[in-house]
Amino acid sequence: MSDPVIVEVVIAAPVDVVWRAMRDPAEIRRWFGWESEQLDEEIRFIFAEATTADDEAHVLDGGEHGAIALEAQGDRTVVRITRAAPAGGWEGVYDEVNEGWLTFFQQLRFYLERHPGRERRTVHIEAGGEEWYRSEHQVGTVREDGALVIRTRERVIVSEYS
């Protein structure tokens, strides 16, 4: 039996554009996580050292930590993250890693659909605006100034582009 899909995000960009955004460290820095002194090290570890890339299949395999697979759908791409479930399954389980992947791939979607090629800065402020997405444990909204605001149990994250 294969691992269950824990996150699925559809991005309005071709698969080669999404794959490049997941393989080029400069591109990853524009959407992954948030600004911190450890960001480059985290990118290197997650997207290079801890995964095996299959460029033809557009899959990053992290072994027991799960996999990220892209599916081309014309000018759109489906991003799926799979991870082994705990003994009782994922239903009703709050998992910081799963919520992190949801946040990060919504940030990738926002970057590619609204701000491709632009630099980002991260600020922590109050949320508000048009709902972008909602899950059991987080809400993403887009403010009037064009920033993506993600609210989780632990924090509010804002992605802005110059």
Image: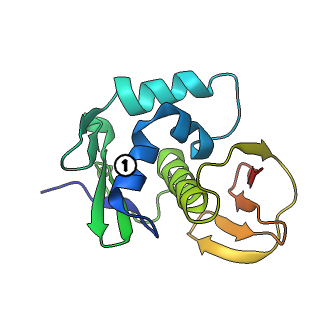
* Residue located farthest toward the front when viewing the structure as drawn: 117
Rendered image quadrant of residue 140: bottom right
Residue 25, placed above or below residue 22: above
Rendered image quadrant of residue 103: bottom right
Q: Residue at x 83, y 70 (%)?
A: 128
Which is nearer the eye, 23 or 124? Answer: 23
Instruction: Report x, y in % for residue 27.
Output: 53, 40
Q: Residue at x 69, y 55 (%)?
A: 153
Name the image colouring.
rainbow
Which is nearer the eye, 30 or 135? Answer: 30
Residue 143, placed above or below residue 37: below
Q: As drawn, is 142 to the left or to the right of 105? A: right
Rendered image quadrant of residue 142: bottom right
Which is nearer the eye, 102 or 27? Answer: 27
Q: Residue at x 40, y 38 (%)?
A: 23
- Work out which quarter of the rendered image holds the N terminus and state it: bottom left
Q: As drawn, is 36 to the left or to the right of 2? A: right
Instruction: Report x, y in % for residue 100.
Output: 54, 48
Instruction: Report x, y in % for residue 58.
Output: 26, 49
What amino acid type is highlighted by mark number 1?
Trp
Instruction: Report x, y in % for residue 49.
Output: 36, 23
Query: Please, what secondary structure does the residue beneath circle 1 have?
Result: helix
Mark 1, Cα crowd under 10 Å, few <14 / some 14-19 / many 20+, is some
* Residue located farthest toward the right when viewing the structure as drawn: 126
Residue under numbered circle 1: 19
